[in-house]
Image (tube, rainbow, N blue to C red):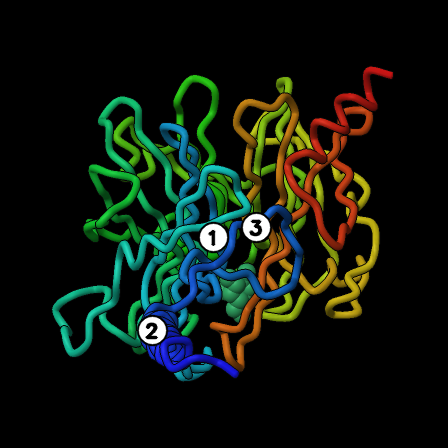
Amino acid sequence: MPSKTHIHFSKFLLVQLTILVSFFGLKAIAQKPKQPEKQIIEPAKEWLDNKANPINAHGGGVLYYNGIYYWYGEHKIPGKSEEQFADGGIHCYTSKDLVNWTDGGLVLGVENNSSNYDLEYGCLIERPKVVFNAKTRKFLAYFKFYPKGNGYEVAYVGVATSESPAGPFKYSHKFLGPSPKGSGDFSMFIDDNGDLFHLAVRKPDKAFIIAKMRDDYMLPIEEYKEVKNVEHHTEAPAIVKINGVYHLLGSGSTGWKPNIARYYTSTNLYGPWKKEENPCTGFNKVDSLGIEKTWGGQSSFIIKVNGLKDAYVAMFDVWRPEMPIKGRYIWLPIVMKQNKFAINWLDSWNLDFFKQQSFNSKK
Ligand code: DGJ
């Protein structure tokens, strides 16, 4: 039979245990679970940030600065469709490995009821891209900007600046670019000598055009020219230069619906460009889509991976215009085959892929 002391001690233990469980249990509820460290990128699946919230950075681009990747994209307002004006500004996330992303919040936001401010809620802010100007030491954010009330009629380039890559960015001005109707999807490409170029699709004829920007990167410094041999209606351009050759990955023009990718190479940004074969291969099982729809994605940017030779990542968006915040991301490694892109669908991957690649090519 258990002694009286034994029974007292067991009761004491039980009480202590209950206190401990309820204390830590409550703490677990109060603190939202932190997202465990991820090891892989899974294209087209839901991607969570460090707070376990879905990443909200659509149509974006990535800037590498001082050991950190900054991912800037369209912040979509929860519960709003594109028709109900979902654009809330530019959202930034940071990462050291391109896999785990920390929420850096809104770095440029729209404002409610402020008709004397260009970025009034109801305007459209799309495809933000950020560059660093080594001369002025400023960070500049560019975005496709449609002022409130005009729909997709006239497209400006919006410009905002910051002293830090983490923001906040301050809206500076807008410019129209190549025509009175402006220009749409674009790329801001910095060449080896620091010159910045604006390449975009002109409105309304959809020709692909180019102009060099001023040294301070704030405005174009020359008349826009038509780029030679890039088809009309080329949207979503992403450009990189590899061993003296420019590579342009883009899409056709079908609104929010995906279409087949377009790929060009050239030794001159102004052209002539050479149309290459579609570099995409494989099948997206998440959305059951193949390369005739670019796996359901539309290109937005190409990331150069720091510290690895010939390591590039192609970024695509899966748009969901009826609930844009639910849009997803397809990121895939670019392999260079005979100096041309090859982008194959992978269900999951990480940066070790590139180490494996260079190992294979040395064999
Ligand atoms: C395609 C563009 O690439 C997107 O940024 C967006 O403007 C949609 N068209 C709108 O239809």
State which tag comes first along the sequence, 1 or 2. Answer: 2
Tag 3 residue? 38
Mark 2 CB lies closer than 8 A to ligand 1: no
* Other-residue count near label 3 (Cα within 10 Å), few / some / many at <14 / 14–19 / ≥20: some
Q: Depth check: 134 or 329 in front?
A: 329
The residues bearing labels 3 and 2 have C-alpha atoms spaced at a distance of: 36 Å
Q: Residue at x 79, y 65 (%)?
A: 285
Q: Nearer the viewer, residue 329 or 294?
A: 329
Q: Secondary structure at mark 3?
A: loop
* Closer to the eye: label 1 or 2: 2
* Residue at left offset 42%, top offset 17%: 193
**Farthest-out residue, right:** 363
Question: Which SS class for mark 2?
Answer: helix
Residue at image point 64% right, 36% down: 351
Q: Earlier in the sequence, mark 1 or mark 3?
A: 3
Residue 256 on image: x %, y %? 59, 70
Residue 86 position, x and y percent, is 39, 75
Q: Is residue 352 shown above or below 338?
A: below
Q: Which mark is residue 16?
A: 2
The amino acid sitting under disc 1 is: Gly
The answer to whether residue 337 is left or right of residue 219 is: right
Q: Is residue 60 left or right of residue 269?
A: left
Of marks 3 and 2, the one in the foreground: 2
Quadrant for the C terminus, please.
Answer: top right
Q: Amino acid at mark 2?
A: Gln
Q: Could one spot residue 178 in this view of the protein?
A: no
